[in-house]
Amino acid sequence: MRHILGFGNILHGDDGAGPWICQLLSQMQLAVDVRIFDVGTRGLDALAVLTECSEAVLLDATVPAGSPGLIRNLTAFELEPDIGNDMHHNGLATLLSTLPLLTDSPPSLRLITIEAANYRRFDQRLSPQVQQSCQQIACMLADEFGVRYR
């Protein structure tokens, strides 16, 4: 099985990029071995999902740093132990360090991040830059996983 996991809070503007991409992908017909999960902000809750697959793509927004919408595609070897400053990024770092302790054969992992323009509390809208990047990532994953529009 291959899993795509979207991390983020849809009520905090650009922080909802991961779930937003999952929503786009849910409108497409996926290969039979691909599953999509909106895992919200609690990284450790995704452990069970990750122990049931051979490959996983993790989607998340990163803190604003001057290049809104910047997409980074990282392999497991490039993942930084301290991915970010807010709570679910720390949960994601803990998740990544805990996973090898739970299984003899952890999945192949990749993290795709989008730099946020800002985090607006209680606002479900994405910034234009992040929305465009989310669409690019959804198209990239659709090509990679053989996804077809319904």
Image (tube, rainbow, N blue to C red):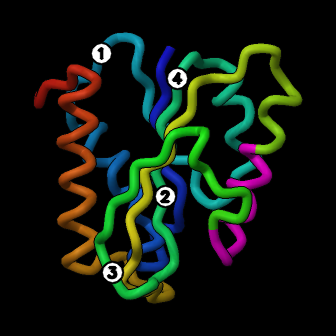
For disc 2, the marked residue is: 60
Q: Residue furthest left?
A: 149
Q: Which mark is residue 67?
A: 3
Q: Which callout, 4 or 3, points at the residue further toward the start of the chain?
A: 4
Q: Is disc 1 surrounded by few (<14), some (14 to 19) or many (20+) residues within 10 Å?
A: few
Q: Horizontal and vertical percent for residue 54?
A: 57, 16
Residue 95 is one of the magenta-drawn residues: yes
Tell me the amino acid under the disc marked 4: Glu
The residues tagged by marks 1 and 2 sit, at their Cα atoms, a distance apart of 22 Å
Check whether the beta carbons of the residues at disc 2 and disc 4 lie within 8 A of each other: no
- Residue, x 71% and y 64% (percent of image)? 82
Mark linked to residue 31: 1
Q: Which residues are magenta?
A: 84-96
Looking at the image, do the residues carrying marks 3 and 1 touch, with CB atoms under 8 Å apart? no
Marks 3 and 1 sit apart, C-alpha to C-alpha, by: 33 Å
Q: CA distance from mark 2 to mark 3?
A: 15 Å
State whether residue 117 is above or below residue 7: below
Q: Disc 4, disc 1: CB below 8 Å?
A: no
- Which tag is nearer the camera, tag 4 or tag 3? 3
119 to 44, vertically: above or below: below
